[in-house]
Image (cartoon, rainbow, N blue to C red):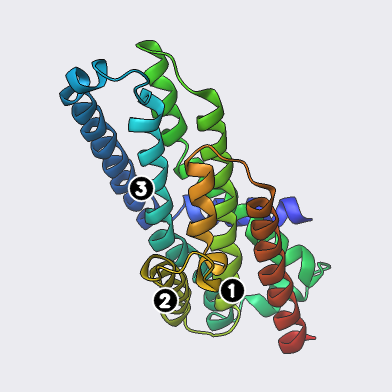
Amino acid sequence: MIFLIAQRELRSLLTTPSTWFVLAVLQCIFSLFFLGRLDELLEIQPQLAQLANPPGVTFIVAAPLFNTAALLLMMLAPMFTMRLIAEERRNQTLVLLLSSPLSNQEIVLGKFAGLLIFLLLMTASIPLMACSLALGTSLDSGLLIANYLGLILLTASYIALGLYISALTKHPVIAAIGAFSILAGLWLADIGTNVPDSPWHQLSPLYHFQNFNSGLLDSRDVVFFVLFISAFLLLTIKRLNRIYG
């Protein structure tokens, strides 16, 4: 049943013209940034040749590309999560969905999985661009895997929070603004504090992504993402139970 809901969400997204426009713009941004990093790498080649242990092309080109994708997804995810529940409530189609032989848990997890698959497909060009560098040089596979795993967890956390905000209102625009405001607020609070042990660091998904971006697989970051995602999915399920229970 979860697969059917996910398939329904994917079909709905792929039949919307605005989705393809956003996809085209996003690929242009990724491509321009990728080519820009390559140009910078070529410019600093003489300086790198003088270093005993120069940073590799994966660190110079691929890792910043993943970091850029993380920031762009913070802005894009709320645009897609706003329609998952808020738009269905406004159009009164959620009642029809809930009247089907599906539990609230299956509906929430299906919508979550559908959008996660879609956003991962939308950003699939990033690891492909990074892997294309292997045609001319050796890559740090560990750093690439860590970055892609971090991007998956980060995207899932964006969707989980946006899904919950979408369940709080019938107005999609308010849901998008609310989700983006929370995500941006956590990010700004994180980069705005100079205290190493500040709780704002621990609450920001982007802060925990930085270790993945550097190639560090810390179990505490994985636990944070799992708890963050699970908490907002449970809150969304309880919200639906409260409204339509």
Residue hosting label 1: 85
Q: Which label number is shown at residue 130? A: none
Q: Position of residue 217 (x, y in %)?
A: 62, 41
Q: Which label number is shown at residue 68? A: 3
Q: Position of residue 117 (x, y in %)?
A: 58, 47
The amino acid beneath tag 1 is Ile
Q: Does label 2 or label 1 sit earlier along the sequence?
A: 1
- Element carrying mark 1: helix
Residue hosting label 2: 181
Residue located at (19% from left, 25% from top): 44
Residue located at (45% from left, 44% from top): 122
Q: Does label 2 or label 3 sit earlier along the sequence?
A: 3
Residue located at (38% from left, 28% from top): 129
Q: How many marks?
A: 3
* Left or right side of 60 for 142: right
Q: Quadrant of residue 108?
A: bottom right
Instruction: Report whether residue 194 is seen.
Output: yes
Measured along the vertical axis of the image, is residue 92 above or below residue 228? below
- Element carrying mark 2: helix
The amino acid beneath tag 2 is Ser
Q: Quadrant of residue 28?
A: top left
Q: Position of residue 145 (x, y in %)?
A: 56, 32
Q: Does label 1 or label 3 sit earlier along the sequence?
A: 3
* Left or right side of 17 for 150: right
Mark 2 near mark 3, Cβ–Cβ under 8 Å? no
Crowd band around label 1 with a 10 angstrom C-alpha radius: few (<14), some (14–19), many (20+) = many
Quick one: 23 or 232, which is closer to the camera?
Answer: 232
Specify the quadrant that holds the C terminus.
bottom right
Specify the quadrant that holds the N terminus.
bottom right
Give me the C-alpha separation between circle 2 and circle 1.
18 Å
The amino acid beneath tag 3 is Thr
